[in-house]
Image (cartoon, rainbow, N blue to C red):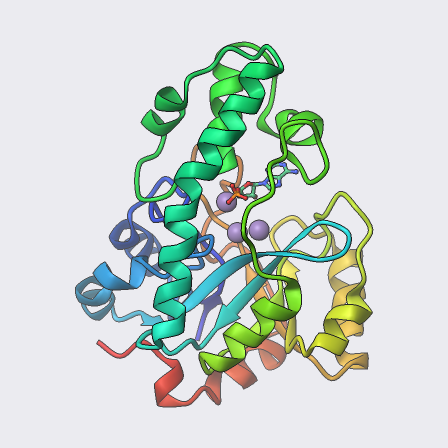
Amino acid sequence: MKVDLHMHSTCSDGERSPEEVIELAANNGLSHISITDHDTVAAYEVAERKAKEAGIQLIPGIEVSALSDHGELHILGYGLDLSNTELKRYSKWRTHGRVHWSKQIVKRLNELSYSIRWEDCMERVVGTGISRTHIAAELVAKGYFRTINEVFSKLLSYGKPAYIERPQLSTKGAIDLIHRCGGYAFIAHPEIYDFSWSFHSLVQEGIDGVEAYYSKNCRETTAYWVKQAQEHRLLTSVGSDFHGETSRNPQMIGSVSYDVADVHQWIGHLQPQQLFVS
Ligand code: AMP
Ligand code: MN
Ligand code: MN
Ligand code: MN
């Protein structure tokens, strides 16, 4: 077994199609992966044939952008029942919502004297949904900023001048949705939030696990989150957060090492209805 449970396809802001993601995973010797697009499970509609061909076990997953009291936290869901109508509705709701929301962001940017066009941001979308990453990339291309990160920290992050609220689940709402879909909820990349947030609130809200093994962690932060998970009797997961070789998150699928005993145990116990059977 070789596992990576966090990666993006063109169904959100990844550069590779779901089929290409599966091929890359197979080439890197992975046996179990989860494609975790932002707020959508659309990748699984087209992944079937490829997964079968490549001999890869897909674990149906999603990365939900949820609102905590302090800012946006990403909640990963694994082992989801893809036939769940609520999940389908959520996926559609968030994808459609992005159109109006992204237009509002661009309008606000125009008011702030950044001269970009929504249509040009859309041109950057390869797959289904526009995200702030595409808008940030357009601002960088127009020479307003040097990096996408800079755009987020100055304009697009929660509470910044071009941050626009969108209908969104709370962290509790996201965890409950994942549970109703038969899945496990994990806090994604606990080290990368640029605001302070409450791990204990998530524990109280019923989070099942922590993405303790993450591509951008160092040895110490990994050890810290493994310990936190153990203390709270939570599961641990492993994720590269691959978005494509030339993206801001180029860490290759399967590049993150992890404690096999820790991660493989719960994956080995997933029920047939929590796996993607092709
Ligand atoms: P959205 O779905 O529009 O919220 O955008 C999600 C994308 O924005 C994800 O790829 C995030 O990793 C990225 N993102 C969120 N916050 C930041 C940040 N502070 N700096 C850079 N990228 C970010
Ligand atoms: Mn992303
Ligand atoms: Mn994330
Ligand atoms: Mn991600």
| Residue at figure coordinates x 31%, y 57% from the top left | 43
Q: Position of residue 186 (x, y in %)?
A: 61, 69
Is residue 4 visible in the rendered image? The answer is yes
Q: In the rendered image, which quarter is residue 29 located in? A: bottom left
Q: In the rendered image, which quarter is residue 124 located in? A: top left
Q: Is residue 221 left or right of residue 273?
A: right
On-image quarter of the N terminus: bottom left
Q: Position of residue 277 (x, y in %)?
A: 26, 79
Closer to us: 90 or 237: 90
Count the marks: 0
Q: Position of residue 250 (x, y in %)?
A: 49, 40
Q: Is residue 149 above or below residue 26?
A: above
| Residue at figure coordinates x 50%, y 30% from the top left | 104
Q: Is residue 142 left or right of residue 89?
A: right
| Residue at figure coordinates x 77%, y 52% from the top left | 70
| Residue at figure coordinates x 78%, y 66% from the top left | 199
